[in-house]
Image (tube, grey):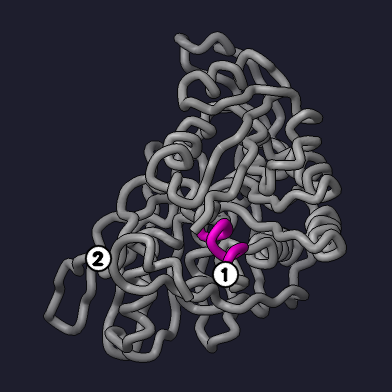
């Protein structure tokens, strides 16, 4: 298995874990050749920290003929522009979520990848971790019988102004983890309805220790969303998001004819899994590997898929379906009616049960 040469664009906070893993556990199939950032010092710092041989400008990275794949870790508003430039340079692209801010941008990226003969995919890849892969196996093996419905709750508190901008908020930031998990476990979404509200249209920094204490800002995106999803496999699911409560309280449960599966937090690669069958309640051990924080697992899977010819699991089509569903939930609220989902995607193939490199094969 050869190592695919990768260039990382965007060297902010999230890049640290990616680079740690790409230069560590995933170096068997990945070689990080360069990193770039609009702030050169940040790229230089990350390169020095993780032994990346080159820190350069974005233009220099895209012009390097040896770099096969670009990992786009920029801010959401820049995802489309950076990914498009990388595709036009003939690079495969793995981007942080969301794929783009609008559906039209997402469609253009998928079309550009097809026309250039390259691949596009991206986060989240937490569904490839030990927790949700084990959940998938339990469901596929019939441990809860026929799945009927699921509940996904994203409940947390966020104070930063950047979180309340268009293209962010709980639905577009945390929502992809939960929507991707539902699609992975139960299948794609066919129809949605929902209610989207903004309980506090203007917010004020209230922490006296914050440099922005007393500053007010406008909330540009709904923060309290409740949606009902009709899934292609015959299940329904309820998704609730709120980012104005204390703490962090995620929940994902799947209910079947013979049992209930309490899944791990989809924002994590693992966590406690509980199987309830009547009075029998037990914690389930993992059947799969990658229980640790394995950001970049989807990049490794794409690198191997490039060499074997199979589809990569964290695909651009999956990202677009999640983006499509997210917009449809807000449109359902605005229009007061169900929304049919125009996009469709197959459930990603699960990993083989077990540990090590062999799980990627097939």
Asked whether the residues under the numbered discs 1 and 2 touch, taking CB atoms below 8 Å apart as contact, a structural biologist would say no
For disc 2, the marked residue is 286
Q: Nearer the viewer, mark 1 or mark 2?
A: 1
**Nearer the observer, 88 or 12:** 88
Task: Decide whether the magenta segment is chiefly helix, strand or loop.
Answer: helix
- The residue sitting at 68% across, 25% down in the picture is 37
For disc 1, the marked residue is 308
Residue 259 in sight from this viewpoint: yes
Q: Is residue 303 magenta?
A: yes
* Element class at badge 1: helix
Label 1 or label 2, whichever comes before in sequence order: 2
Residue 333 in sight from this viewpoint: no
- The residue sitting at 12% across, 79% down in the picture is 280
Query: Marks 1/2: CA distance?
Result: 27 Å
Q: Which residues are magenta?
A: 301-308
Residue 106 image label: none
Q: Is residue 26 magenta?
A: no
**Nearer the observer, 283 or 72:** 72
């Amino acid at each position: 298995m050869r190592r695919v040469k990768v260039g990382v664009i965007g060297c902010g906070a999230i890049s640290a874990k990616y680079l740690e893993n790409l230069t560590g556990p995933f170096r068997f199939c990945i070689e990080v050749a360069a990193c770039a950032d609009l702030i050169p010092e940040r790229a230089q710092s990350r390169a020095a920290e993780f032994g990346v041989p080159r820190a350069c400008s974005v233009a220099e990275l895209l012009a390097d003929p040896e770099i096969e794949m670009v990992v786009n870790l920029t801010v959401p508003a820049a995802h489309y522009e950076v990914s498009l430039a990388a595709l036009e340079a003939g690079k495969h692209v793995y981007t942080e979520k969301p794929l783009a801010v609008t559906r039209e941008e997402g469609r253009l990226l998928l079309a550009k990848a097809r026309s250039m003969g390259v691949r596009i995919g991206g986060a989240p890849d937490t569904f490839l971790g030990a927790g949700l892969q084990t959940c998938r196996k339990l469901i596929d093996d019939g441990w809860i019988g026929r799945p009927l419905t699921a509940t996904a709750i994203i409940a947390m508190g966020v104070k930063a102004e950047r979180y309340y901008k268009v293209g962010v908020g709980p639905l577009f930031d945390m929502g992809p983890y939960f929507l991707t998990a539902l699609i992975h476990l139960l299948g794609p979404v066919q129809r949605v309805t929902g209610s989207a509200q903004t309980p506090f249209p203007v917010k004020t920094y209230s922490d006296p220790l914050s440099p922005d204490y007393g500053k007010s800002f406008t909330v540009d995106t709904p923060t309290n969303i409740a949606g009902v999803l009709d899934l292609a496999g015959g299940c329904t699911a309820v998704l609730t998001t709120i980012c104005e409560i204390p703490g962090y309280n995620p929940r994902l449960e799947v209910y079947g004819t013979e049992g209930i599966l309490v899944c791990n937090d989809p924002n994590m690669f693992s966590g406690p899994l509980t199987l309830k069958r009547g009075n029998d309640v037990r914690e389930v051990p993992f059947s799969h590997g990658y229980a640790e924080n394995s950001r970049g697992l989807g990049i490794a899977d794409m690198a191997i898929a490039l060499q074997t010819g199979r589809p990569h699991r964290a695909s651009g089509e999956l990202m677009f379906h999640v983006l499509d569903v997210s917009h449809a939930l807000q449109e359902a609220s605005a229009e007061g009616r169900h929304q049919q989902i125009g996009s469709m995607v197959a459930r990603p193939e699960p990993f083989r049960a077990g540990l090590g490199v062999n799980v990627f094969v097939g």
